[in-house]
Image: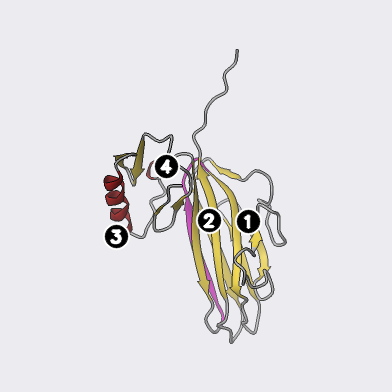
């Protein structure tokens, strides 16, 4: 298994059928490990911003973007975004609480995109759900249609013909708090369509 990490994205598929790897537009031969390492190192040191460009991502790969949320005392809105390139399919979105939130008021999370502000997760009370993940495999999954999932739940994933931005927010309404720790994982793939042949 070949694994290369971008600041946001992790390639998790073998590169056994690739003839070249493009790292932010720079083509390097798949067998040239030193060139690949150099190109990836350049990405890691040059910028923490992903360009939402399908040419910068390897076709046919599964990627995971992670965003973290850390609660601080008092009311406020926490916001994180994930860019999804045109032609990608979002196959799952997972929300994990490593520690549940404890603001004195409400603590409500939602996750959506340009088409539907809570299409992935709708009005999730992160003071109670999901329960704190202390074992590493808990959380809410839209693919599994877990409680709190929005209209994008289940099915075969959401195909994005145009580039989209996934936006996640947590809104706390009162005083106190500071315990909450959450992780958002967005899984998507860039596929290469192959037309069927009529005989």
In the image: residue 169, left or right of residue 28: right
Mark 2–mark 1 distance (CA, rounded to whole Å): 9 Å
- Image spot of residue 172 (x, y percent): 60, 77
Query: Which label's residue is closer to the chain start, 2 or 4?
Result: 4
Specify few, some or many for label 4: CA neighbours under 10 Å numbering under 14, 14-19, or 20 or more. Answer: many
Mark 3–mark 1 distance (CA, rounded to whole Å): 32 Å
Please tell me whether mark 4 sits on a helix, a strand or a loop: loop
In the image: residue 20, left or right of residue 159: left
Q: Nearer the viewer, mark 2 or mark 3?
A: 3
List the residue tagged with mark 2: 166
List the residue tagged with mark 1: 120
Q: Start and end of the magenta stretch? A: 75-88
List the residue tagged with mark 4: 58
Residue drawn at the location 68% of the way across and 45% of the way down: 155
Mark 2–mark 4 distance (CA, rounded to whole Å): 20 Å
* For residue 162, above or below residue 83: above
């Amino acid at each position: 298994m070949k694994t290369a990490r971008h600041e946001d994205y992790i390639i998790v598929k073998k590169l056994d059928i690739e003839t070249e790897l493009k790292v932010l537009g720079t083509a390097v031969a798949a067998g040239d490990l030193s060139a690949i390492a150099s190109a990836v190192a350049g990405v890691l040191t040059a910028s923490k911003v992903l360009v939402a460009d399908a040419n910068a991502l390897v076709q046919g790969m599964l990627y995971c973007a992670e965003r973290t949320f850390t609660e601080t005392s008092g009311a406020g809105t926490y916001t994180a975004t994930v860019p999804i390139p045109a032609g990608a399919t979002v196959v799952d979105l997972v929300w994990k609480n490593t520690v549940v939130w404890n603001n004195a008021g409400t603590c409500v999370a939602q996750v959506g995109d340009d088409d539907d502000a809570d299409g992935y997760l709708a009005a999730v009370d992160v003071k109670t759900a999901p329960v704190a993940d202390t074992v590493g495999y808990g959380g809410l999954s839209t693919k599994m249609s877990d409680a709190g999932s929005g209209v994008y739940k289940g099915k075969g994933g959401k195909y994005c013909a145009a580039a989209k931005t996934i936006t996640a927010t947590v809104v706390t309404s009162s005083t106190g708090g500071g315990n909450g720790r959450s992780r958002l994982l967005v899984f998507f793939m860039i596929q290469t369509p192959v037309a069927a042949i009529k005989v």
